[in-house]
Amino acid sequence: MPPTQIVATLVALAGAVLVTSLWKQLLTLLLVGAVLVFFFGVYNIATALAR
């Protein structure tokens, strides 16, 4: 295996790991955002009904 191929493989692996971790972070952020919006909506409905 020539050095250039080793470097290319390492770069590809690093890129794949980075994309996977970023994807998981984005997914977590989306999930947290959705939950926050949901609870905010429920809270608004509850306060509107309480009036």
Image (spheres, grey):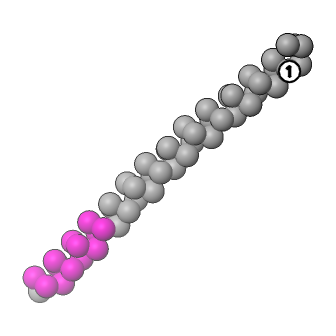
Magenta highlight on residue 33: no
Residue at x-position 35% and y-position 67%: 37
Whether residue 9 sits left or right of residue 38 in the image: it is right
Residue at x-position 81% and y-position 20%: 7
Q: What element carries label 1?
A: helix
Image coords of residue 21 (percent x, y): 55, 37
Q: In the rendered image, which quarter is residue 4 located in?
A: top right
Q: In the rendered image, which quarter is residue 47 located in?
A: bottom left
Q: Is residue 13 above or below residue 21?
A: above
Image coords of residue 3 (percent x, y): 87, 13
Of residues 38 and 48, which is closer to you in this image? 38
Q: Name the residue under label 1.
A: 5
In the picture, the quarter occupied by the C terminus is bottom left
Whether residue 19 sits left or right of residue 3 in the image: it is left
In the picture, the quarter occupied by the N terminus is top right
Count all numbered tags in the image, as a single digit.
Answer: 1
Image coords of residue 14 (percent x, y): 68, 28
- Residue extent of the magenta highlight: 38-50
Residue at x-position 18% and y-position 84%: 48
Q: In this view, does 44 lie above or below 38?
A: below
Q: In this view, does 44 lie above or below 6?
A: below
Magenta highlight on residue 40: yes
Of residues 46 and 2, which is closer to you in this image? 2
Q: Which residue lies furthest to the front in this view?
A: 1
